[in-house]
Image (cartoon, coloured by chain):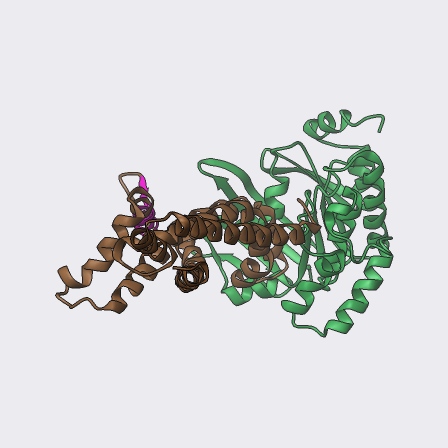
């Protein structure tokens, strides 16, 4: 197999990798914010002097499970659940669906905690100033709080996003064909490490790009500090 | 008719009462200074008046707009969300720590709420903001962000931000307590000029000389009650109560 054939195959795999990457971000960034809100929800009742917050508790359990069990295991559970739980036949497409669903659910849990750390770090005075000026709760969050949160959570977000690039290779476990799956099969058939090296370089370069973009956004937001 | 009126306000944090039956009414054009030791309830009273805290008992009205009133069990019942929002449009509040929005420029700090909340014409708001910036002595700082300004400049932006909402009155919660003496003077100068224009103001302050010279009336609060109140000069120079005398003696020579 010549180099250009190999790179072509890896390139096709990389497109699938990018799909997982961008769809996960598209789903997990907003879902994470929603989960952060549910986690911080204070609605509840008193039971023998202890305040019980059901919405927050359920969300905490969710985050705990998502963080406390392997993503690979979650992939398998979500991939096989339609068959074992609902008796539905698995199709070629279900690998893709399971991958995206598992990644979004898993990453949203991590993102939620990052959002929460950012939201809770904004001083009370910002909310009070907004309230006195008549901003609605939605306006306060969108115009005043969120822009400041974004600036504060960029470094941990960069970490998570770089981890996501590498984690996309876990989709290999349920047979979804992305770049790592392709590299593995080339190595097995050609009896050379070249495909691993090439895939490794592509992951690395893509992560350099991610770091560069995030660094650029950080610099753009450095026009103020507080 | 008074601009703001609080009657028989009672408020406690957990089981500790911090306001014990406080009444305060401010007329149009009047400047009221509230003085007293820390923990005496001054800031809590201001926070109740500006709806940042709720009180358990008593009534609050802005002009003819009743914000909260007592029911038959003497529990305060607050008005609808609409009533509260209408009330908020009648006053401005200047905080001890400025609480400017750090990601907005000076101009945007002042104009964002009038444009986005009050839905006023953007060009008119910007014109008004420019006049306020000039009045605050902040020309040339329009595009700067708060972290590029001194504390005194930040506090003057905060005053301009409050004024741009065209409130009927202003509350100040220890507006100079975070500033050194020099910056304090530049902020006090601005408040003084507002007083000369007969802006209705309630000012919680530790600046006794300023309170005496600028306020029409001074209220001395301690232990959650109004110990003494009266015309500014009388109260500072001839306090009647022992507690007032003891408190003011610590500021002698100022």
Residue A130: which quarter of the image? bottom right
Residue A52 within the segment the image draws in magenta: yes
Residue A61 screen position, x and y as percent:
29, 46
B118 sits to left or right of A66: right
Q: In which quarter of the image is the C terminus of chain B?
A: top right
B230 sits to left or right of A157: right
Residue A26: which quarter of the image? bottom left
Residue B107: which quarter of the image? bottom right
Q: Residue at x 69, y 43 (%)?
A: B96
Which shade is chain B? Answer: green
Q: Which residue is drawn at 72% across and 28% down?
A: B247
Which shade is chain A? Answer: brown
Q: Which residue is drawn at 63% across and 42% down?
A: B43
A221 sits to left or right of A11: right
Instruction: Tell which residue pokes out farthest to the bottom in this image.
Output: B121
Q: How many labels does the image show?
A: 0
Can the viewer see residue B63? yes
Residue A124 screen position, x and y as percent:
56, 46
Tell which of A6 and B80 is nearer to you.
Answer: A6
Residue A121 within the segment the image draws in magenta: no
B254 sits to left or right of B1: right
Stretch in magenta: A50-63
Residue B239 screen position, x and y as percent:
76, 32
Can the viewer see residue B51? no
- The majority secondary structure of the magenta stretch comes to helix
Tell which of B58 and B139 is nearer to you.
Answer: B139
Note whether B222 is above or below A61 in the view shown.
Answer: above
Instruction: Tell which residue pokes out farthest to the front in this image.
Output: A2
Q: Quadrant of the N terminus of chain B?
A: bottom right
């Amino acid at each position: 197999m010549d180099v250009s054939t190999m790179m072509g195959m890896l390139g096709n795999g990389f497109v699938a990798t990018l799909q997982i990457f961008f769809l996960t971000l598209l789903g997990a960034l907003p879902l994470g914010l929603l989960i952060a809100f549910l986690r911080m929800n204070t609605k509840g009742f008193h039971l023998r002097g202890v305040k019980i917050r059901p919405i927050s508790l359920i969300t905490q359990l969710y985050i705990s499970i998502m963080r406390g069990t392997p993503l690979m295991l979650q992939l398998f559970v979500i991939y096989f659940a339609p068959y074992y739980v609902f008796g539905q036949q698995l199709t070629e497409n279900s690998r893709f669906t399971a991958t995206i669903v598992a990644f979004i659910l898993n990453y949203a849990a991590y993102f939620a905690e990052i959002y929460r750390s950012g939201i809770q770090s904004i001083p009370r005075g910002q909310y009070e100033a907004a309230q006195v000026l008549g901003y609605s709760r939605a306006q306060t969050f969108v115009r005043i709080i969120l822009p400041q949160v974004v600036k504060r959570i960029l470094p941990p977000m960069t970490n998570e996003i770089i981890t996501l690039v590498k984690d996309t290779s876990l989709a290999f476990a349920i047979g979804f064909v992305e770049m790592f799956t392709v590299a593995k099969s080339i190595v097995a058939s050609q009896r050379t490490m070249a495909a691993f090296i090439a895939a490794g370089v592509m992951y690395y370069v893509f992560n350099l790009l991610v770091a560069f973009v995030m660094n650029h956004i950080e610099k753009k937001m450095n026009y103020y500090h507080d | 008719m008074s601009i703001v009126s609080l009657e028989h306000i009672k408020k406690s944090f957990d089981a500790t009462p911090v306001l014990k039956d406080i009444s305060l009414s401010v007329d149009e054009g009047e400047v009221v200074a509230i003085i007293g030791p820390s923990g005496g309830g001054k800031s809590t009273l201001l926070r109740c008046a500006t709806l940042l805290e709720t009180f358990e008992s008593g009534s609050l009205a802005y002009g003819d707009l009743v914000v909260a009133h007592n029911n038959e069990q003497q529990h305060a019942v607050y008005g609808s969300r609409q009533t509260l929002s209408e009330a908020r449009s009648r006053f401005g509040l200047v905080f001890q720590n400025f609480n400017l929005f750090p990601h907005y420029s000076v101009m945007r700090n002042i104009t964002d709420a009038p444009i986005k909340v009050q839905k006023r014409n953007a060009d008119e708001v910007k014109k008004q903001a420019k006049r306020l910036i000039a009045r605050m002595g902040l020309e040339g700082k329009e595009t700067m962000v708060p972290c590029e300004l001194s504390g005194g400049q930040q506090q003057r932006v905060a005053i301009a931000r409050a004024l741009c909402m065209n409130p009927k009155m202003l509350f100040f919660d220890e507006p100079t307590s975070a500033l050194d003496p020099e910056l304090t003077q530049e902020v006090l100068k601005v408040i003084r000029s507002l007083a000369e224009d007969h802006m209705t103001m309630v000012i919680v302050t530790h600046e006794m000389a300023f309170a005496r010279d600028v306020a029409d009336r001074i209220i001395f609060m301690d232990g959650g009650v109004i110990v003494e109140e009266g015309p500014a000069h009388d109260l500072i120079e001839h306090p009647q109560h022992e507690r007032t005398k003891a408190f003011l003696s610590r500021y002698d020579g100022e």
